[in-house]
Image (cartoon, rainbow, N blue to C red):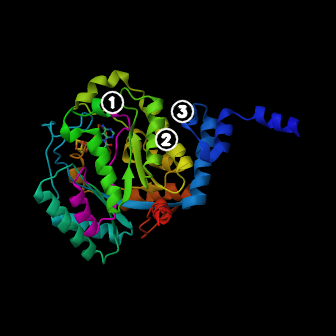
Amino acid sequence: MLNSYLNRYFSQTIVDRILEKKNVINKEDIITLLSTKNPSKKNKIFNEACRIKEKYVSNKIYLRGLIEFSNICQKNCLYCGIRSGNKSIYRYELSDKEIIKLAIIAWQNKYGSIIIQSGERSDKYFIYRIDRLLKEIKKNTNYEIGITLCCGEQTEETYRRWFESGAHRYLLRIETSNKNLYNKIHPNDEVHSYNRRIKALSNIKKTGYQTGTGVMIGLPFQTLNDLANDLLFIKEFDIDMVGMGPYIEHKNTPLFKYKRLLMSNEERFNLTLLMIAILRIIMKDINIAATTALQTINIIGREKGIKAGANVIMPNITPTKYRNRYLLYDNKPYLDENNSKYKNYLYTQIETNGNGIAYGEWGDPKHYFNRIELQL
Ligand code: 5AD
Ligand code: SF4
């Protein structure tokens, strides 16, 4: 008996042993998993993540039609191509009519949900405009389309106003859970404060939104310890939805000067896949997106993200004429993802991998309902 136990113990790798621990995976374990380089060990991690995905959230892939409706931003994050300090880009704003038309197209194409994303603004015109748009979109889609907002830090009152007008999910990336690193990649002032961001994320959750966050992977100065802490932060905060992607440098940003400190694109890509898989293992019932930044490094990056445990993709339905103006980072793809030829290709890829696209479903994160139930 003891012999067979010892035989089994010594034939297992450390990755096997961590994966068997399931709920008690700690920071050291996460760092070990993130350091995995061997392809067959990595596959074990991805397979375990997919097994958990299938068991807890099914193998359905949910679609969110992404509308990048304006690149006007009052902030000046040191890594982002649409920061207010970048004077070399044209600023745009889609009209209400254009946005509502895109929402209707998403609804007719059975996307289930849309994401309305823009740079951050806190002026009255912007707040009332979003409010009006939410109501109009709901009315024009027979109250059937789900709406996620991704419009940055706002007051608690604004979050509540938008929630009451029809948005039920909100994404606000923490970018990094390491306060020192956060300060290094943002200007040092009140509007770019780490504490303010945490407060905003708490207010989003408190308002009742399905709450999403995320981080960038492969930032200059970032360590595996930071990334392990990011995953633990997401778990501790009891987040419902996550979008994480590789950091990709943009030449017209201050952070570009640290390019020589960066890992290769391939390393950032592989690390992102591991982050997705480990997150799925430690937070079984959340929604995890395979992001555009993954696709930027590898043309089938999002499909690989799904094979690592993600269950959401966000086809970009912003008209292509605006697409080259929402360049958060270099080489962001311009593809018209509502184009039927491209859409069929992407969906066939996903379906041949044993996952099914959930057409016309909101695809709410199961975690949200599980955590609400626990609070009652
Ligand atoms: N590389 C990767 N992601 C970026 N974002 C902004 N700039 C970059 C970049 N250079 C991400 C941030 C932000 C989201 C809208 O885009 O995480 O929250
Ligand atoms: Fe604005 Fe967001 Fe870019 Fe920061 S990351 S500059 S808030 S769009």
**Which secondary structure lies at badge 1?**
helix
Q: Quadrant of residue 193?
A: top left
Name the spot of residue 375 as percent of width and height, x first.
Answer: 46, 63
Question: Which residue, given by chain and number where applicable, does mark 2 sit on?
Answer: 275
Name the spot of residue 250 as percent of width and height, x first.
Answer: 27, 34
Location of residue 253 with respect to 103 vertically, above or below = above
Q: Which mark identifies residue 31?
A: 3
Look at label 1 and name its amino acid.
Asn
Name the spot of residue 302 as percent of width and height, x first.
Answer: 45, 48
**Magenta region includes residue 155:** yes
**Between marks 1 and 3 in the image, the one whose residue lies nearer the viewer:** 1
Question: Which residue, given by chain and number where applicable, does mark 1 sit on?
Answer: 180
Residue 282 visible in the snapshot: yes
Kindly report the distance in space between the C-alpha atoms of the residues bearing marks 2 and 3.
Answer: 10 Å
Q: Which residues are magenta?
A: 151-179
Frontmost residue, 233 versus 330: 233
Whichever of labels 2 and 1 marks the residue nearer the N terminus, that label is 1
Q: Which mark identifies residue 22?
A: none
**Which secondary structure lies at badge 2?**
helix
Whichever of labels 1 and 3 marks the residue nearer the N terminus, that label is 3
Frontmost residue, 221 versus 137: 221
**Magenta region includes residue 359:** no
Residue 336 visible in the snapshot: no
Name the spot of residue 252 as percent of width and height, x first.
Answer: 21, 32
Q: Alpha-carbon neighbours of circle 2 within 10 Å: few (<14), some, or many (≥20)?
A: many
Q: Alpha-carbon neighbours of circle 3 within 10 Å: few (<14), some, or many (≥20)?
A: some
